[in-house]
Image: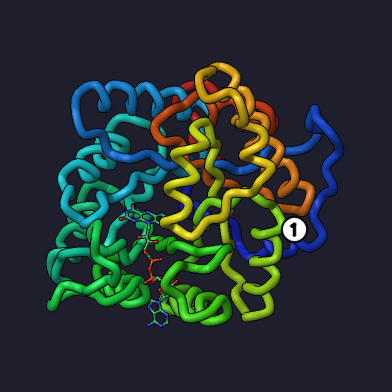
Amino acid sequence: MDHISPTSSTLERWLAGPRIPALPAPRDMAPPKLSFEFFPPKNEAMEKSLWECIRRLESLAPRFVSVTYGAGGTTRSRPHATVSKIVAETSLTPAAHLTTVGATKEEVHEVAREYWAAGVRHIVALRGDPPVGAHEYTPHPGGYAQAEDLVRGLRDVADFEIIVGAYPETHPTAVSADADIDYLKRKIDAGATSAITQYFFDTDIYLRFIDRCLAAGITAPIIPGILPVTNFAQVSKFSAMCGASVPGWMGELFEGIDGDATTRQMVAAMVAAEQVRLLQANGVDEFHIYTLNRPDLAYAVAHLLGARAKPAGVAGA
Ligand SMILES: Cc1cc2nc3c(=O)[nH]c(=O)nc-3n(C[C@H](O)[C@H](O)[C@H](O)COP(=O)(O)OP(=O)(O)OC[C@H]3O[C@@H](n4cnc5c(N)ncnc54)[C@H](O)[C@@H]3O)c2cc1C
């Protein structure tokens, strides 16, 4: 697979896309294009469950899988080990996240060169967050100040396909929603070919965001990031930090089932599948699922949407 993102015809499909009836998905309708996100394991037990997750989702032949880079940029070896093993031992196409945090430009280039040497051709280029407790992001004195510069720098390192982050509800530090979209355009103009969004729960938020991106002249695909939620309290806390809103209806759906993990799983699958179906109904045909290294929900959502396991070794379309 040369490209992990669709061409601008995604936008045409979005504008004039199919209108989706209730489940089950019509048999002649192609399942959506999927990608999955993992985080690198911190110990042996996590390593084992990550690989069970990767193997299970590999059977769905996703377009790509991405591996996050530790907050603070401190854990360079863990993502590298995971991504290299994905290249060496699976049929999957990995996209390695890379941040600018706490590193000089040359150090970032070195990580990128190591990825290229390991066979990685796709990078999710991010600025990264300030360390816990710090309010403002302070770049390393010899480092990149923002993702736009990182994208430009990576272009000089190797011919990576570069993906950037996008914020349907506006990045918490943006001056305004319009400025945030202008800045996304700058990242694309600097050489990124697509973006993945921060997760969101109300479909309208993404659709309105795409409208504003189109109006601002952004034609690159903006892949919606989907987070299936099982732990409502945890997600509410995290969302407050990253600027994603948690709608009241979601709180109501999880009311009274804190101690009932099985029901929470079912509700989570239903909510995520419904969200993706609503987006499909608006012509969106590609989704990035945040797996949190747990395969069941991502697998269930994909299955509901018509994705079926392929024989081992079959790569994504
Ligand atoms: C899909 C996705 C994956 C992620 N993966 C990771 C990961 O693996 N590891 C990790 O640590 N974090 C990750 N993050 C979190 C990310 O690092 C944070 O959201 C961080 O605060 C911003 O990163 P960025 O690349 O979007 O930054 P940037 O795009 O550089 O900047 C963030 C915002 O600041 C404003 N801004 C910055 N520079 C300018 C400028 N010159 N002019 C005007 N406005 C400006 C813009 O509003 C912009 O949206 C991920 C986020 C997303 C959406």
Q: Secondary structure at mark 1?
A: helix
Circle 1 packing at 10 Å, graded few (<14), some (14-19), many (20+), is some
Foreground residue, 109 or 102? 102
Picture coordinates of residue 289, whole percent (x, y): 52, 41
**What residue appears at the point 61 percent right and 72 percent down from the top-left corner?**
219
User: Which quarter of the rendered picture does the C terminus lie within?
Assistant: top right
Question: Horizontal and vertical percent for residue 255?
Answer: 62, 30
Residue 233 percent across, percent down from the top left = 48, 38
* Image quadrant assignment for residue 156: bottom left
Answer left or right for 196 relative to 67.
right
Residue 18 falls left or right of residue 206: right
Task: Name the quadrant where ligand 1 sits.
Answer: bottom left
Residue 215, how many percent across, how many down? 68, 79
Q: Nearer the viewer, residue 82 or 22?
A: 22
Which amino acid, by three-letter code, is at mark 1? Arg
Q: Tell me which residue sits at (37%, 75%) in the image.
A: 148
Vertical arrangement, residue 274 with respect to residue 194, above or below: above
